[in-house]
Image (cartoon, coloured by chain):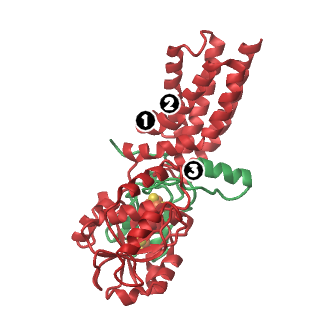
Amino acid sequence: MSKLKYLPNVVTLKLDRAKCNGCGMCQIVCPHAVFKLEGRKAQIVDRDACMECGACALNCPEGAITVKAGVGCASGIISGMIRGTEPTCDCHAEGGNCCG
Amino acid sequence: MKTRNREFKKAVKGSLCSPSIPKVPCKLSLSDRFNNFLVRASFNRHDYAVDPGLYALGEPTADSPVMVSANYKLTFDLLRQALVGLSAWILVLDTNGVNVWCAAGKGTFGTKELVNRVKLTKLSEFVSHRRLIVPQLGATGISAHEVRAESGFNVVYGPVRAEDLITFLSAGLKATPKMREVTFSLPDRLVLVPVEVVQGFRYFAFASIFLFLLGGINPVVNLLAAYFAGAVLGPVLLPWLPGRAFSIKGFFAGLIMLAVVVAAGTVEASLVELLAWGLLITSLSSFLTMNFTGASTYTSPSGVLKEMKLAMPLQIVAAIVGALLWLVVRFF
Ligand code: SF4
Ligand code: SF4
């Protein structure tokens, strides 16, 4: 089965290659193989696979990556709308499956 | 924590080696397994925690690896099962009994807690190396370079799945690209289905009673079909349903179940009735499957928001029109 893909061209992921030192951390932490080191610099190779988890940005020692990480579940967004707050989420899954 | 964990606590106490470090057996007992099943099906999700702190698995020495885990018992159990036959230290963070990924997203499995726990447990006195093996999914909450700056320990990200840990360790802490990727396979999704079903069941039961009073058993069957479409069929058939947006996939799951109820004869043979149930079943199913984005492992928040803004108005209008049509055939 080929890899499941979500909506194209929506994610907020940005990479500033000028700041990158080629440490490869982003490639290690990303659960969807969005980054690849090319010529001693990171490169976004599969942007639409990004789920905006924020791991890459948090672990980039040079601050070269920005992404608006957040809750990716409908019920979380709805409860956020109702309460007028940022989306919140009750996680209910195990084994790495989670809303958030 | 108090009741369900009793078996486990006993096992810990029964095999203490040093007074401050509890030892854990790496095999799961039958009662562990049964309780884990109950938790998965969300009958008893709360109070299923392990005490935070440092645990000894097997007979670890100063050179043994340190595995960082969450204090959710299922996570902890997966870890000790994956390490059968190995000696290691397990550093359990306080994540309020929530698994690694969820807790990392919330920040409870985070840099601050890790640095704190390393200090509280005096980890540096137990091991001679300065390495912490953190599950990769914890990276959403942990910043490796900050942990090093604040604690002197290097974070090495382990594989996504605990079952790959042994391979990872014997390869000299190297993970293959496959071990780094999160999947959303059929078994992954199947595990989540009971959760989806239980979640909305209250509303379903309430609506069923209402429908039964108005129209007998047939509308209840149709509603059940819609519920099944959105909470079971949508998630299970995810890769094969058309469209990328979950709401669209859910719509198609609804169409399948519409065909089923029409064939079963619970939708009366009139065009208005067919239209009414068509709208009701597909809109409900679309909404329920859209909710499954919360459990999926590849949907981005920006995408979910975009999808919701487009889909929700349509779902609401379709449901209202469907309900009105149904009432019209029923009472006029
Ligand atoms: S983590 Fe940052 S510095 Fe390291 S390779 Fe990626 S972008 Fe470059
Ligand atoms: S936000 Fe997460 S999924 Fe997206 S590129 Fe970064 S690590 Fe990968």
Q: Evaluate whether label 2 is on the same chain as label 3.
A: no
The colour of chain B is: red
Left or right: where does residue B223 sit relative to residue B246? Answer: right
User: Looking at numbered disc 2 in the image, what kind of residue is underneath it?
Assistant: Ala
Locate residue B222, reporting x and y percent. Answer: 58, 23
Mark 2 or 1, nearer chain start: 1
Write down the chain letter for disc 3.
Answer: A
Q: CA distance from mark 1 to mark 3?
A: 19 Å
Q: Are marks 2 and 1 in contact (CB under 8 Å)?
A: yes
Disc assigned to residue B196:
none
Q: Are marks 1 and 3 in contact (CB under 8 Å)?
A: no
- Residue that label 1 marks: B237
Left or right: where does residue B6 sit relative to residue B27? Answer: right
User: Looking at numbered disc 1 in the image, what kind of residue is underneath it?
Assistant: Leu
The colour of chain A is: green
Q: Evaluate whether label 2 is on the same chain as label 1.
A: yes
